[in-house]
Image (cartoon, grey):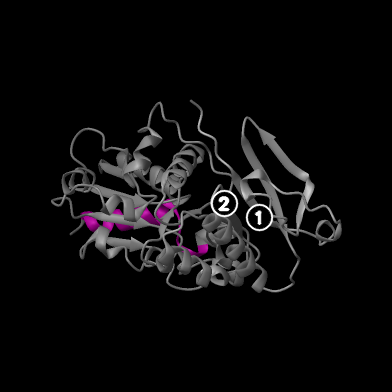
């Protein structure tokens, strides 16, 4: 039997649709009329109702708090798996509502794109730095930062399966290549929060490279360079910290063996919290400063979010 899922998507309109007078209702809302729902955006297929809700245009950050409150309200009402989407940096405007969703145990889904300095020329005001760390610290909040399209699909499955709290998907602006799962581990490893994406060739790893999101591709590149130098490197993709830490200790130690202390993490955000994974002797590479305005590759090179930085840190650890 096919599961019927109702989804509500929220976005910002020019204001025209809110004045159109077309306020149809969905059977999922028990006949309530909701201002702002445009009839032309309503579609249904095999019992799955999709509503594209356009909030009234408000030319300040409060509109994001308003929209995130709408998402929470739909979820409280029931009949929908609601999600809201915006740039990751603007999650700051949504924090009161996100925090309430955590307190209330509501399975709201937040889709936060442009998740790092990779968004480029918009500069420091639009480049999230501390956001991953601060949201990971929020009790009952789950943040998933996938590395490619296949991990994103698994992340959506996890988000839809969660019923006791919100999930935030932190997604890249960059056009990331789809990882070759014929060579690398299957994306189903996301369901454990973290997994060995590419293991060391020829024996136990000398160093473990850990990361999330778009930086996983940098780790894979670094692994190739290190391998050519005779340094065996394992790459661990860690999209969901909370889920990984909830796994049995045996699994966590299988992915991150305690005896292998040479570890390097790379994430285009604050390094706060990474010491729990790389240990006191490992190296956490990231951004403990604000970004800059330039094309994404230029910023990454300038701020050290590169495969070369991972290789250099790994070489330094090998000297110890």
Residue drawn where x is 45% and y is 31% of the image: 180
Residue under pointer 2: 82
- What is the crowding at mark 2: few (fewer than 14 residues within 10 Å), some, or many (at least 20)? many
Q: Position of residue 57 (x, y in %)?
A: 76, 66
Q: Which residues are magenta?
A: 302-318
Q: Is residue 225 above or below residue 115?
A: above
Side (left or right) of 173 relative to 14: left
Residue drawn where x is 82% and y is 56% of the image: 17
Residue under pointer 1: 10
Q: Quadrant of residue 306?
A: bottom left
Q: Position of residue 307 (x, y in %)?
A: 42, 51
Of the image marks 1 and 2, the number of the one nearer the N terminus: 1
Front-most of residues 75 and 231 = 75
Q: Position of residue 8 (x, y in %)?
A: 62, 49
Side (left or right) of 202 relative to 190: left
Q: Quadrant of the C terminus?
A: bottom left
Side (left or right) of 269 relative to 226: right
Q: What secondary structure is found at the residue carrying circle 2? A: strand
Q: Quadrant of residue 71?
A: bottom right
Q: Seen from this angle, which residue lies furthest front?
A: 31
Q: Is residue 290 above or below residue 184?
A: below
Residue drawn where x is 47% and y is 37% of the image: 150
Front-most of residues 304 and 277 = 277
Front-most of residues 213 and 54 = 54
Q: Is residue 111 visible?
A: no
């Amino acid at each position: 039997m096919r599961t019927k899922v109702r989804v509500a998507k929220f976005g910002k309109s020019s204001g025209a649709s809110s004045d159109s007078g077309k306020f149809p209702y969905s059977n999922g809302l028990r006949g309530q009329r909701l201002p702002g729902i445009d009839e032309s955006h309503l579609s249904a297929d095999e019992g799955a109702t999709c509503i594209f809700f356009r909030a009234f245009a408000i030319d300040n950050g409060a509109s994001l708090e308003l929209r995130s409150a709408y998402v929470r309200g739909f979820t409280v009402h029931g009949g929908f798996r609601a999600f809201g989407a915006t740039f990751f940096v603007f999650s700051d405007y949504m924090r009161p509502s996100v925090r309430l969703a955590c307190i209330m145990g509501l399975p709201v889904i937040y889709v936060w794109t442009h998740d790092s300095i990779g968004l480029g020329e918009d500069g420091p005001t639009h480049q999230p730095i501390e956001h991953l760390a601060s949201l990971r610290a929020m009790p009952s909040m789950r943040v998933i930062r996938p590395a490619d399209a296949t991990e994103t699909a698994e992340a959506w499955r996890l988000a839809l399966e969660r019923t006791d709290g919100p999930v935030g998907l932190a997604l890249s602006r960059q056009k990331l290549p789809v990882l070759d799962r014929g060579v690398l581990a299957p994306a189903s490893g996301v369901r454990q929060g973290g997994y060995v994406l590419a293991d060391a060739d020829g024996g136990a790893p000398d160093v473990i490279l850990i990361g999330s999101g778009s930086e996983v591709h940098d780790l894979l590149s670094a692994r190739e360079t290190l391998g050519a130098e005779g340094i065996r490197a394992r790459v661990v993709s860690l999209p969901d910290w909370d889920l990984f830490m909830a796994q049995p200790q045996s699994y966590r130690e299988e992915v991150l063996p305690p005896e292998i202390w040479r570890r390097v993490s790379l994430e285009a955000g604050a390094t706060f919290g990474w010491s729990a994974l790389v240990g006191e002797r490992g190296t956490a590479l990231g951004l403990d400063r604000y970004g800059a305005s330039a094309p994404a590759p230029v910023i990454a090179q300038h701020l050290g979010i590169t495969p070369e930085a991972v290789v250099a840190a790994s070489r330094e650890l090998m000297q110890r």
